[in-house]
């Protein structure tokens, strides 16, 4: 069996092929990471919307509670003054 001598050009081609394969693997991996970031971004936006709604509802409940307290105070004052 005859040994083939490896030339500089052969070696350069092997290195180039190796880099090309690594480049493809890295690109695939970055595509997966980008996809995951996009999924996380969408989930984050959903959570932000839900939190905004909850914040609004809490504010509304606080205003209602204040209004109920004020109504109760006015009622007591009216009763003391004999208006009711």
Image (cartoon, rainbow, N blue to C red):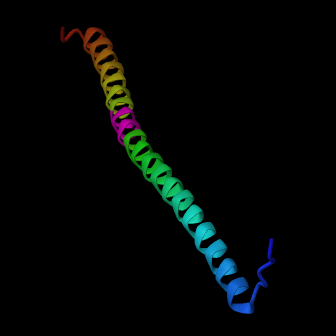
In which quarter of the view is residue 65 placed? top left
Chain part drawn in magenta: 49-56
Is 55 part of what is drawn in magenta? Answer: yes
Front one among 71 and 37: 37
Q: Is residue 61 above or below residue 14?
A: above
Please name the predominant secondary structure of the magenta segment in the image.
helix
| Image-based side of 23 in relation to 75, left or right | right
| Residue sitting at x 66%, y 72% | 18
Q: Quadrant of the N terminus?
A: bottom right
Vertically, is 12 above or below 18? below
Residue toward you, 55 or 84: 55
Question: Which image quarter is the C terminus in?
Answer: top left
Q: Position of residue 81 (x, y in %)?
A: 26, 13
Residue 37 appears at what percent x and percent y? Answer: 49, 53
Q: Is residue 64 above or below residue 76?
A: below
Q: Quadrant of residue 11?
A: bottom right
Taking 62 as reference, is 51 above or below it?
below
Q: Residue at x 77, y 84 (%)?
A: 6
């Amino acid at each position: 069996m005859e040994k083939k001598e490896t030339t500089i050009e052969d070696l350069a081609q092997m290195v180039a092929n190796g880099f090309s394969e690594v480049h493809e693997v890295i690109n695939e991996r970055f595509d997966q990471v980008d996809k995951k970031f996009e999924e996380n971004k969408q989930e984050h936006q959903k959570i932000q919307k839900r939190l905004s709604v909850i914040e609004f509802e809490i504010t509304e409940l606080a205003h209602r509670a204040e209004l109920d307290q004020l109504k109760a105070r006015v009622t007591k004052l009216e009763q003391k003054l004999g208006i009711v």
